[in-house]
Image (tube, rainbow, N blue to C red):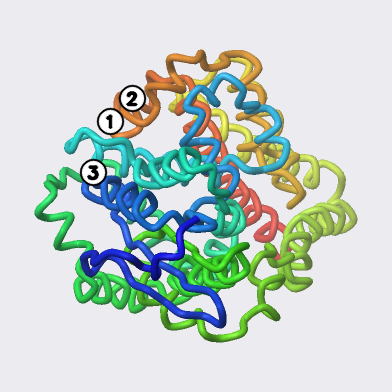
Amino acid sequence: MTDTPFPAHDYSDDVAAIQYDDKTILLVGTAHISQQSADLVEQVIAGERPDTVCIELDEKRFTALSQPERWENLDLKQIIRKKQLSTLLVNLVLSSYQKKLGGQLGIQPGAELLAAAKAAEKLDTPVELCDRDVRVTLRRAWKATSFFRKGYLMATLLASLFDKTELDEEKLAELRNKDVLSEMMNEIGEALPAAKHVLIDERDIFMAEKIKSAPGKRIVAVVGAGHMQGIQRVIGEDNSNVMEEIDTIPPISKGWKIAGWSIPAAILLSLGVIGFRQGAGEAGANALYWILANGIPSAIGALIAFGHPATIISAFASAPITSLTPVIGAGYVCAFVQVMTQPPVVKEFEAVSTDISTVRGWWQNRLLRIFLVFIMTGLGSSIGTWVGGYRIFTSLFA
């Protein structure tokens, strides 16, 4: 290591030097689809020779970037068992959008983060992954978003799939400008304040604390330009007491648990009352209506998704039952059956980032078809729950 003052060079506005106690931190703000950012990161690390390099990645995302062949080892059945299909889908949407923009510039999304890791490896410098687990971030953001805002968030994500934005390095330079980014962050905050707090503010705090605790006195931290101002604002604060809280997925509240069980309990109780008041025949007729009202729309959803015949049958059979329990939905049952009957092959995993941005791709790619099955059968079951429940409650008070 050298005793040259840190930083030793003059850099652009994309680099900020921060003094914290006895540490000097060089914060490098990047665009995740920019060759200029990748070159800057290599220049800074090679020129400054820091004690530690921090990068805005968690373990999962680092593995995804550094080992593209990970698709071959992805256990979809385990993902479904852990109810992580929604998280995986959001990850695919976001990575597809970045890859599409990066493809216009001939650069892999996140290349500057990989460049940071490789530059550190050349100098035998330790690398610290300073971002929060992406699964925790996504689930906290979803939970923090209100019911109506969830629809807005999903619509925004889906719209990004078919976005035709054309970018060049000049436009990326504009996006890296701090004033433009501040304006963008403010717009997110106004539209989705709760999600912005989780996606931006909490991660600013998390990364700042991780960067401060990195070993050594000379630190280079490579983060997205959108986090530059936030990290600079909070890095001087002691937020160690909130780290455990913001790194945890909030449990489902008792109120939601009660609400989740109240609908099936009301349905079963109503059928019992109908049987007591109006006879077993009327109770049986309502029970049959419940089965058909749930099973048929869910099976139609599987059919629309081009599900395997076994998936369509499982949709009809499972929806009336899963609608009576909040523990598991018809979508997960049907997705599992679809994986077992028509598992995607490696080339479909590799093509998913391209196929996901076309309507036809959703039906042709067997990985995306699993998500279609999950979404369409779950939607059908939800419709059936309301239709069947309305019929039963109408009979109860007739």
Question: What residue is shown with label 1?
Answer: 358
Mark linked to residue 361: 2
Image position, residue 131 (x, y; %):
54, 58
Q: Residues within 10 Å of mark 3 (few under 14, many from 20)?
A: many
377 or 228, nearer to the observer: 228
Image position, residue 256 (x, y; %):
71, 68
83 or 301, nearer to the observer: 83
* Three-letter amino acid code of the residue under disc 2: Gly
Residue at the image point whose x is 23% and y is 69% from the top: 13
The answer to whether residue 92 of the structure is visible from this angle is yes
* Three-letter amino acid code of the residue under disc 3: Gln
- Circles 2 and 1: CB distance less than 8 Å? yes
Q: Is residue 65 left or right of residue 84?
A: left
Question: What residue is shown with label 3?
Answer: 35
Sequence-wise first label, 3 or 2? 3
Helix, strand or loop for disc 2:
helix
**Which quadrant: the C terminus?**
bottom right
Residue at the image point whose x is 69% and y is 73% from the top: 245
Mark closer to the observer (3, 2): 3
